[in-house]
Image: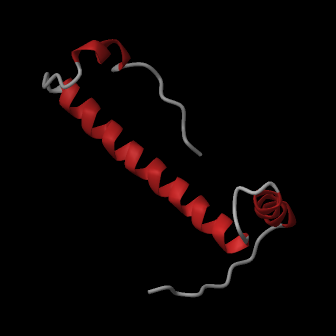
Amino acid sequence: MTIQIAIRLHEEELAALDREVAEGRAASRADAVRRSIAYLERAQRYRGEEETLLRLARNADVVYPDLEVVYDLPHPKLD
């Protein structure tokens, strides 16, 4: 099921969608928005998985022993 929504975009945001279409990475503006949402969902999953792995590591439940050196490295924000 799909639900139609109305949004307001700044000219620069609309131009970014149009570039995705013009450069062939999206079939339409709607497709570009759907792809952007998929990117957001992947970023959310990544953050959740990262939190789980760090929690396991800090509790000494070593899941990936070779990665112990990255536990306390700064992580860039995805935004």
Q: Residue at x 43, y 51 (%)?
A: 44
Q: Residue at x 73, y 71 (%)?
A: 29
Residue 16 at x, y percent in the picture: 79, 58
Q: How is the image coloured?
A: secondary structure
Q: Residue at x 23, y 33 (%)?
A: 55
Q: Nearer the viewer, residue 35 or 65?
A: 35
Q: Is residue 8 left or right of residue 4?
A: right
* Image vertical order of residue 75 relative to residue 42, above or below: above
Residue 12 at x, y percent in the picture: 84, 60
Q: Quadrant of residue 54?
A: top left
Q: Is residue 47 left or right of residue 17?
A: left
Q: Is residue 11 left or right of residue 79?
A: right
Residue 70 at x, y percent in the picture: 37, 18
Residue 77 at x, y percent in the picture: 54, 38
* Image vertical order of residue 34 relative to residue 73, above or below: below
Q: Nearer the viewer, residue 57 or 63?
A: 63
Q: How many marks?
A: 0
Q: Quadrant of residue 69?
A: top left
Q: Is residue 17 left or right of residue 53?
A: right
**Quadrant of the image containing the N terminus:** bottom left
Q: Residue at x 58, y 87 (%)?
A: 4
* Image vertical order of residue 3 relative to residue 32, above or below: below
